[in-house]
Image (spheres, rainbow, N blue to C red):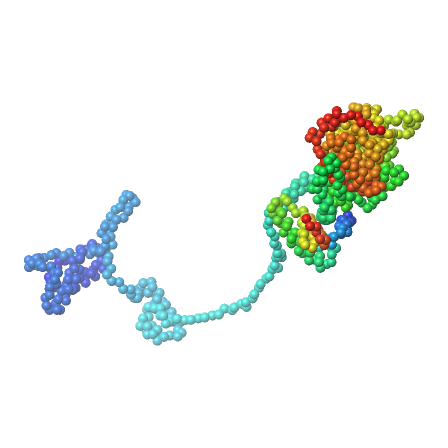
Amino acid sequence: MSVSHKVGTMKSKQAPNVNSHQKAAVAKGVKAIGKKKDEEEGLDTAEGEEWMQGKTLVKPPDQLDLTEAELNEEITRVLKASNPNAPQNVVRYSFKEGCYKPIVFVDQMAIHFELEGNLVHKESDEGRRLMAKQAEVDDGGGVERPDNVAIKAAKREQKLTNQFNFNERASQTLNNTPRDISCQTEPPPRANFSATANQWEIYDFYVEELQRREKSKEKHEGQFLNKEEDKSKKKMIQAETQNDDISQLAKVVKIIERMVNQNIFDDVAQDFMYFEDASDEFRGEKGTLLPLWTFQYDKAKSLSVTALCWNHKYNDLFAVGLGSHEFTQQGGGMLLFYTLKNPSYPEFIFNTASGVMCLDIHEHLSYLVAVGLYDGCVAVYNLKKKTDQPIYNSRASSGKHTSAVMQVKWQKDDLDSNHNFISVSADGRLVSWTLVKHELVFTEIIKLPVIDTIPDDLKDVIPTVGTSLDFHKQKDYSFLVGTEHGKIHKGSKYYSSKFLEKYDAHFMNVTRVKWNPFHPDVFISCGWDWMVKIWDQTMKSPVFTFELKTSVTDVAWAPYSSTVFAAVTTDGKVHVFDLNINKYEALCQQKVVSKKTKLFNIEFNPVHPIIIVGDDRGHVTSLKLSPNLRKKPKVESEVLNVHFQMSLHISLV
Amino acid sequence: MTAEVEETIKRIQSQKGVQGIIIVNAEGIPIKSTLDNSSTVQYAGNVHQLLMKARGMVRDIDPQNDLTFLRVRSKKNEIMIAPGKEMYAFLFRIQKPKQM
């Protein structure tokens, strides 16, 4: 509908505005002609009304000035039912065609005003529901409000919810009596633990772990054993742990004892290690012997020392054999082991049935000691075992010596790797004893030849007493035997019928014969005829002869020099000779024991510059050699050779 | 305790200058002593700590090493301690230690 545009016709325009608006509200989606211009007119007309009221024609300053003709121009306004605010260019992606397509139909409804009402149509669902409720309330009765009545009167058909119409109903349930059930457990046992984790504790633990593993391995391997054996082993282990305690204690106490002794003999120990007699420089060739410790044992007072031997492995340990030299005074005997670390008490003590005459410690297995006794028995002791008894004894076996065993010497293991040793005794026989399992097996090697002075018919009865025996260091089949008659026989293990050589050494008993440790041909002998003689085995007469005013009981070569040797005599003197320095005289002749004490044995320590001498009181005295006595030549055996070549045969009769 | 050990202890005791000897077990409780009770307990307690410390020191530096002997010299006397694995013994001397 077209309306002419005139300034004056305001009100009339308003009404059709309202009408068109209503129509637009109802008719949705109807394509109607826009009424934009209508709205504009509406605004303009509002302004125009103000003007009308003011009764003056006031032109706004920015009003468009139009001419009359333009004012009278008819402009057609078109009313449309479309929403001018609705978007006109809505596009939607179409998956079918894969592009955006404009939507043609857009919702054209514009809501100008909205008010929420509380009127419900009585024929709708909700209305019916409310009406039903209303009816119920009427039938129920109860407290009724006056409003309720009024409303009820007014509308019976529709029951509405009334905020004043409420009913409170309470009920109480029965509360059960509260009960507390609690339970308390016994707390786990607690123990306080504290430890330090030091490096060594960790190390200890690892070591133990290793041992445990090894044990478990052994257990796995040894599971084939009988149960009985296991039981016995268990008992052993228990006993061992107990023993461990005691043995530890013993060890500990031993250390204390040694330390106490060291304290007591402190000066001696210092001398032993460090003292060098400076006065030797002024003494020319002579030397002295410095007394160090004296070893004595109470129970051995009545016995005399008969044998001494150093241990090769432990250089401070030496063995002392105690017995008696006198034929008439025979009693028990002893085997003692002393160490330099503890001078006051022996380390090992063994009692023997009869006097010990000789002993020897095995070169390699330093716990095996062979002992020869006065009654002709030989015994072997094992130091590792704690028992007092020898592990081998030749008492009951046949073939034992019928007379005192004068010397025993260990040999190298035989082909079956059995240990064996050789003994010489006063019955004139050289016997080899082999340690086979649990017994000693004897093998006779040779019988000493009887001297010519004995008449033939007594030759079998009276034996030649062998007094000393020594084996060559390098050629161990070759040996020397000294006899009571003063002869020295050289023999070989391979020849069992006769001796290779015979030397007329002394007029009386040969007490000791010893090979030189360096020179292969030289040996030394000493005897009761006051002589010490040095021999070359190729020559029948001695190379050197020394007369020492009394019977010589023992002689020994020094381990550090081929020309040094020492001898002891019955007047208690020790004589030390060095052929390199002085061929005629001793470098040292020193009395080391008190009066009337006879010295019987002498031995050099393999490592330290000390000697031990045994006397007939059962004492062993250790002496340190002064530097003059200890001179080492540059090349060992050649020195002696030179001497021999240059020397004249001097014999003093 | 075996007779041997007893004998050794007696011998030590008889040496001149030795005042007493105490045997202590691993926990520091004296099990045998030749001194009176109160001094034994006193010595045992003090020495135990010292020994632990000394041993710890030695082994800390080299775990394969172990303490063999500990000697404490003072003006008036000297205490010698020998530790074993489970127990240790120590000795108390009253003699004036020699001047070195």
Q: Position of residue A67 (x, y in %)?
A: 7, 58
Where is residue A585, by image quadrant?
A: top right
Seen from the viewer's position, the closer of residues B71 and A414 is B71
Seen from the viewer's position, the closer of residues A553 and A322 is A553
Is residue A137 placed above or below A514 in the rendered structure? below
Q: Is residue A23 left or right of residue A449?
A: left
Q: Is residue A117 left or right of residue A12?
A: right
Is residue A592 placed above or below B37 in the rendered structure? above
Is residue A584 placed above or below A99 in the rendered structure? above
Is residue A315 placed above or below B81 in the rendered structure? above
- Identify the image quadrant of the C terminus of chain A: top right
Give the residue drawn at x 79%, y 28%. Answer: A544
Give the residue drawn at x 86%, y 29%. Answer: A507
Give the residue drawn at x 78%, y 34%. Answer: A586
Total residue callouts: 0
Give the residue drawn at x 13%, y 69%. Answer: A53
Asked whether residue A330 is in view, the answer is yes
Seen from the viewer's position, the closer of residues A303 and A142 is A303
Q: Position of residue A539 (x, y in %)?
A: 79, 24
Q: Is residue A267 left or right of residue A487?
A: left
Q: Position of residue A567 (x, y in %)?
A: 79, 35
Q: Position of residue B31 (x, y in %)?
A: 72, 54
